[in-house]
Amino acid sequence: MVVARECCNSKILREMENLPKSSYPSILQSENLTKYILESSVYPREHETLKEIRNVTASYPMGFMISAPDAAQLIAVLLRLLNAKKTIEVGVFTGYSLLLTALTIPDDGKIIAVDPDRKAYEVGLPSIKKAGVEHKIDYIESRALPILDKLLEDPSNDGNFDFAYVDADKENYWNYHERFIKLIKIGGLIIYDNTLWGGTVALPEELVPGSLRKTRQDALAFNKAISSDTRVEISLVSIGDGFTICRRIH
């Protein structure tokens, strides 16, 4: 999604829209190119129930926070390359990326999905049920850190997960990372969304609207820290609002 739920309001949305066109609304810097990618290679392959969530979310408050469909398509490819079976998702919103994961992993696969906003989750729940994948999902209505800490209390969870997707509060990204580096197996992947923060990470501070500066600083700090983390291989991908893909190597 473009903007994290924890700091979203109409003022922030307006200020995102007033950013220089080189950095918003698309990391690709071209609405026409984004439209071409979606219409030529993403939408034709999009599952019917994913399209349903995307359409219903469009009229939901702060609906622009949905995961970018082209970024979600990349997640599906990575899940299949991993043969992922056990995953964790931090930040669910209306469930687009959650449903995509559930559709991709095996029938006996499991997803621990954590988000304090059950109302948003229930927007996409009918589509999840229609897709026949609800049995793969363990939705927990909570903030994420207590849940991750509880998982780590059980030694059998060390290195027991294949994949994690984080699309939540940026100020806690490093806190999440320190926990996921234990929960995800060696060779597994962790993806952090919004690490380019609407392109503001590349703007001078004085050009960034005030309400976006704190999260921009969080993104900058995380990007700097993750680039020095020798426990993972990384790739910062200019897709959606910026994906940092981490592969645990030890």
Image (cartoon, grey):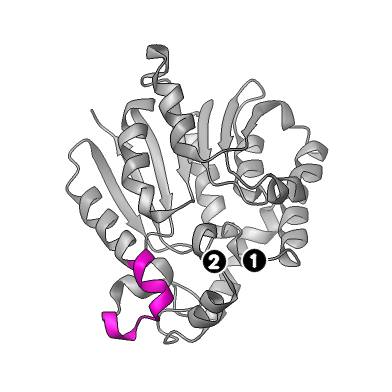
Q: Position of residue 107 (x, y in %)?
A: 67, 24
Instruction: Tell me if residue 82 can be seen.
Output: no
Residue carrying label 1:
62
> What element does badge 2 sit on?
loop
Span of residues in magenta: 205-216
- Residue shown at the point (74%, 48%) measured from the top left: 124
Q: Is residue 174 above or below residue 44?
A: above
Q: Position of residue 126 (x, y in %)?
A: 81, 43
Where does the N terminus fall, quadrant-wise?
bottom right
Q: Does the CB distance between marks 1 and 2 fall below 8 Å?
A: yes
Where does the C terminus fall, quadrant-wise?
top left
Which is the main secondary structure of the residues drawn in magenta? helix
The mark found on residue 28 in the picture is: none
Q: Nearer the viewer, residue 116 or 134?
A: 116
Residue type at numbered disc 2: Cys
- Asked where in the image residue 190 lies, by quadrant, the reply is top left
- Residue 83 falls left or right of residue 10: left
- Residue shown at the point (32%, 60%) measured from the top left: 218
Q: Is residue 38 above or below residue 48?
A: below
Residue carrying label 2:
8
- Asked where in the image residue 237 lies, by quadrant, the reply is bottom left
